Image (tube, rainbow, N blue to C red):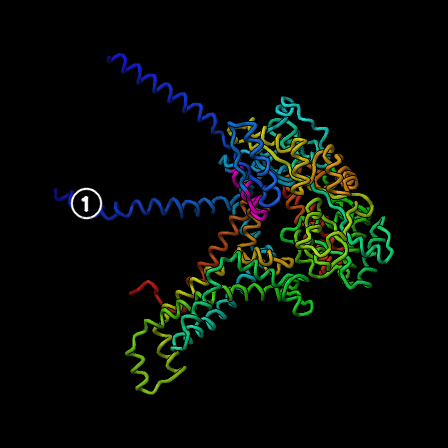
Amino acid sequence: MHFLARFRRRLGPYGFVAPALVVLCGVLLFPLAFSFYMSLFRFSIARPFLGRTFVGLDNYVLALQDAPFLRAIKNTLIITFSSLGIEMIIGTGIAVMLHSKIKFESLYRTILFFPVILSYVVVAVLWRIMMVAEIGLVPYLTGGFAPLSNGLSALLVVILANVWRNIPFVFTVVLAGLKTLPVEPLEAAEIDGAQGLKKFFYIVVPIMKPIFVVVLIMRTMDCLMMFDLVYILTNGGPRGATSTVSTFAVETAFQYFDTGYASALSFIIFFIILIITVLYTKVFKTNVFAK
Amino acid sequence: MKTTNRMVVLLVIAILSLASMTSHAAEIVLNVAMEAGRMADAAQSVVPDFEAKYPHIKVQIVPIPYTQYMQRVTTELASGSGAFDVLESHFLMNAQYIPSGFLYPLDDFIAKYNVDMDDFVISAVAPGTLAGRAAEVSPDGKSVYGLPYNSDVLMMVYRKDLYDRYGLEYPTDWDQAYENMKVLKEKEGIYGYVFSGATHPATHLLADFFTVALNTGGNFPLSPDLKPQMNTPGNLKALELFIKMVEEGIASEGTQEYLYAEKNTVISQGLAAHMSQYMLSAFFAMEDETSSSVAGKIDYKAVPGGNGFCGGWTVSVAATSKYPEEAFLFIEFLTNTENNAKLAIEFGNGPVRRSTILSPEFKEAYPFAEDLLVALDSGQSQYFNAPTLPIWDRIDQIVYTNLAEAIYGNLDAQEALELIDQEVARALRQAGY
């Protein structure tokens, strides 16, 4: 009896989490493991008759020497960190402005929130219609300048479209954080003579650090995995100048059906995201899940 | 009494079973994968007539956007999910699907239902038979895996009103075409030519390039014995022409952004004077008075030099279909003489039957019908030289990437062609050829 009670006490909790673990293994770990297994082969799901050849880590070596893929990594990092920088500055600025009891706050909030309710597909189509050479609004207004025909300006357009779509998300979360700030430290700081920017950077920012970190992590994930915006807006063009790791991997997997190689690319992308996430939590020394 | 009750119960069960069997027979549902837009709409339009003719078969058209079409269909076929009974596909897809055993052979059904294959134009038949060589690679040694559904051949779409205004003659070669483009650029201030230069994806760039190259003495990237052969004087001449057009502003630098549909917009808005474009869809875009400013001012002819570049879509039965014969009945119905004419005239589907193109109704709807037939009969594609090669997607990628680099000034023309041959040779070696 004593043994049974101890057995139940020790193994009981495992029994409760077992179903969740089974589901987790089924939908997350198994595909991950299978994808890694596939990355060790050269084969194509569209050409099964060509067979499967074990190539070990060759696909990974090939990827790290593949100039278009390296360019896609560079583009992804540029898009991610430029977008994040702009979004955080403008988004926080808007949140502070809306928090400072201005007239028609809810009207501004509603108008400014609008872009985030649009899907990336719609955003991409709108921006493409505005930018496309000869027939877009921007080339018309600028006397023929075609932003999508030049690598640098096309990359800038992708960043701007991404920023435009996502600033509302940043300001909404930051505004929610501002509204829940405890008043005591702010009043104490005011009594001590802190005003304006000083109060913001020394009191508000440290208190809201977990919120900023959550926004940064979520937006970083989103940018690193960006696909539909780029795919529709520029299709990775002109000539690969705006291709991202996701568009490159999807193209490899589903246009060229190079399944083994595409699996290796996915793993490399996974590790890039993992490294950046770990770096964030180390740099900000914040456990966003802590009480 | 008890026996009577039992008899009644048994009778009811028998009737219900029979009814269930009958309703089961009436519940044959064919799922048909179609590219969203014109081709799916056209197929949908014949469904009521088909279901009226075969009441026990229901047809569900599944429209899939072009950008996701190949991905979705290939994944479903490779996984053996049986999601689709019928699908439309082009040459590149069939070159992979047929040797993979993804498609159901149609030879026996064609014989059983007396389908007149001779009425189909040759270039439209090619994708479904791998240009007559499917039996060499198909697992069952059969030779027909798709019926022609939509023909695609590039013709010259040009501003006839401007030709008349400046007394220009329709060109017989691309040198003369270039001179005409230059004149119209100078006199009207519009672009002489528009093409698709986008490289992601870029089969349209290949179509535009080879439409010129086939008429400047050029050739496709592979010989029938799989030797790379891009670096030829004819291809160089065509590539230099494209470079010159962009450098001199006869074609805009914006062409590097353009996919298929944007070419139509540039012409229909009166911003350019010529393009090579797939017919008949271009005709619909140009002559739609609600969106085109050049309706009635355009003429359509075989491209200068007369050698057309063709694409084309077939409809096939998936090997995993539980109802291959019913699926065949649908594709046969979709491509029969009556429906081929209806879809071409009402929807702008590329006609696949000679009898359709030569019919008075078609000629009335499309005054360039005879030129179209010539273009379709002479139509070629890069796949025809090596139709059973399953890695054409990789070869195409090498070709269009380097062509674009040269056209937009990052590579010398000669260097680009040499690079294509080297990279194609490497890709063939890697694939074991």
User: Where is residue B380 shown, x and y percent of the image?
Assistant: 74, 40
Say which of B369 and A38 sits in front. Answer: B369
State the extent of the magenta-drawn residues as a range: B63-78
Asked which secondary structure carries label 1, the reply is helix
Q: Position of residue A210 (x, y in %)?
A: 36, 68
Q: Which residue is label 1 attached to? A: A8
Magenta includes B65?
yes
Q: Look at the image and tell me in which quarter the N terminus of chain B lies.
A: top left
Residue at 35% across / 85% down in the picture? A194
Rendered view: A77 above or below B360: below
Report crowding for label 1: few under 14, some 14 to 19, many 20 or more residues within 10 A (C-alpha): few
Specify whether residue B168 is in view: yes
- Say which quadrant the C terminus of chain B sits in: top right
Image height check: is B336 above or below A60?
Answer: above
Q: Is residue B35 magenta?
A: no
The percent coordinates of residue B301 (x first, y second) are 79, 46
User: Which residue sits at x=24%, y=48%?
Assistant: A13
Q: Quadrant of residue A201?
A: bottom left
